[in-house]
């Protein structure tokens, strides 16, 4: 009989990881929480008090054997689910190729979304195109959903002449105006307050726009997180605030960032409905985000979500996770792999098969390689050409201040 463990169990000391290198990682088996455990409240009538159980439990739709059930089942059609699977595969294959490029000196820096592909993709698919995205590092998949071209994304990572931010951001710190994808910030956490502010402005103007943002479990220990929740509680703007609890903030464990049982429960103190969702369950993520979007559109304000997942890879290409956790720890995660879980569900429903899956993976890989070659036509990391120095003065100010103009003239531009 398979042993189960609740997703809220924390049998270890605050600040101390459950496992260290050399330990045998064991999260206790499958989640005890099941798809039918939690009800789906009316989003237009739901209060924070109505979500006490949702903040301490775990919203799931896909069971361990790949069957979708419960009130949170979004009842998506086959086309939408297959599209979601393709987006997730696209992100993982893209990430794999880009990290290999970094390791061979063709990119200077990279961050993968390995194990977290469902988060930005499922959640962005549940939004409307006019909604604003305030991402953290591991939400580049939202750009695929919005239709950004791979060549454009790679040009940014290389920092060549077609980099849409002209080399003024670190690689993978994307920004994309056309997709309403706001620039990723290296000082983590700033995006939370920014999302609340834009949501307040949208509500003031009467626009049908919702903002969504993400930050990590470690960042939730910073003031930016609390500033955002305080304003969201007071002014009730149309915003969705996600804490991605992927167990690790670089090398410190998630239990260092909270003294409570769950991150979701923090939102209740701000009188904001708070949900805790299985972050490797594509259907559950889609469903809770659609619920939160409907609630915001009804004028009921913010929703606070803890996305419970696992960072399967390192923090970045500069990180070596083997020095602070067992190499195989991610293989023991009760939530499994988000891509494999949705694939299993589709196969079980006879909507997908291994032949189509293999063919799609090859097609995407070929597309990534072709896109990299196309991007290098505008310059590569080793030899350029790079954006000219004069671009540091462009697209920053509507009217260039006198002291900036002086600097530009000194540069001879």
Image (tube, rainbow, N blue to C red):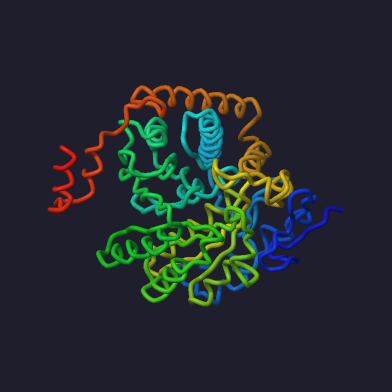
Q: Residue at x 59, y 63 (%)?
A: 276
Q: In this rendering, is residue 203 above or below 128?
A: below
The picture quadrant where one finds residue 412 is top left
Nearest the camera: 83 or 365?
365
- Location of residue 316 in the rendering, given as x and y in whole percent from the top left corner: 54, 44
Q: In this rendering, is residue 237 above or below 144?
A: below
190 lies left or right of 202: right
Asked if residue 389 shows in the view, the reply is: yes
Which residue is farthest right?
1
142 lies left or right of 55: left
154 lies left or right of 7: left
Q: Residue at x 23, y 49 (%)?
A: 396
Nearest the camera: 381 or 288?
381
Q: Residue at x 33, y 65 (%)?
A: 197
- Location of residue 12 in the rendering, given as x and y in whole percent from the top left corner: 74, 65
The picture quadrant where one finds residue 177 is top left
Task: Report the number of numbered marks.
Answer: 0
């Amino acid at each position: 009989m398979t042993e189960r463990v609740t997703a809220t169990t924390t049998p270890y000391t605050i600040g101390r990881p459950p496992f260290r290198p050399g330990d045998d990682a064991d999260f206790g088996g499958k989640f005890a929480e099941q798809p039918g455990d939690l009800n789906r409240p009316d989003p237009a009538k739901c209060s924070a008090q109505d979500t006490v159980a949702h903040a301490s439990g775990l919203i799931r739709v896909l069971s361990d054997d790949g069957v979708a059930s419960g009130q949170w089942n979004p009842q998506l059609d086959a086309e939408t689910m297959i599209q979601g699977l393709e987006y997730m595969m696209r992100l993982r294959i893209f990430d794999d190729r880009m990290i290999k490029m970094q390791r061979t000196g063709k990119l200077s820096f990279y961050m993968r979304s390995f194990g977290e592909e469902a988060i930005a993709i499922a959640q962005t698919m549940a939004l409307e195109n006019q909604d604003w995205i305030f991402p953290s590092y591991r939400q580049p998949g939202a750009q695929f959903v919005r239709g950004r071209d791979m060549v454009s994304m790679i040009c940014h990572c290389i920092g060549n002449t077609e980099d849409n931010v002209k080399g003024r951001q670190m690689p993978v710190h994307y920004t994309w105006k056309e997709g309403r994808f706001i620039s990723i910030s290296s000082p983590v956490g700033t995006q939370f307050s920014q999302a609340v502010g834009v949501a307040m402005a949208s509500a003031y103007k009467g626009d049908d726009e919702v903002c969504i943002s993400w930050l990590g479990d470690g960042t939730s220990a910073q003031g930016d997180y609390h500033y955002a929740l305080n304003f969201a509680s007071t002014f009730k703007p149309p915003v969705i605030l996600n804490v991605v609890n992927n167990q690790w903030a670089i090398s410190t464990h998630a239990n260092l960032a909270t003294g409570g049982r769950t991150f979701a429960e923090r939102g209740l103190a701000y009188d904001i409905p708070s949900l805790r969702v299985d972050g490797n369950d594509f259907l559950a993520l889609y469903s809770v985000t659609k619920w939160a979007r409907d609630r915001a559109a009804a004028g009921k304000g913010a929703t606070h979500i803890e996305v419970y997942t696992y960072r399967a890879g390192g923090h970045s290409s500069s990180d070596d996770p083997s020095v602070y956790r067992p190499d195989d720890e991610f293989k023991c995660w009760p939530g499994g792999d988000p891509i494999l879980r949705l694939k299993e569900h589709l196969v079980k429903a006879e909507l997908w098969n291994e032949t189509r899956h293999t063919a799609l993976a090859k097609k995407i890989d070929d597309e990534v390689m072709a896109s990299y070659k196309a991007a290098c036509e505008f310059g590569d990391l080793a030899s350029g050409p790079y954006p000219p120095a004069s671009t540091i003065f462009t697209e920053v100010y509507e009217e260039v201040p006198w002291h900036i103009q002086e600097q530009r003239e000194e540069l001879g531009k």
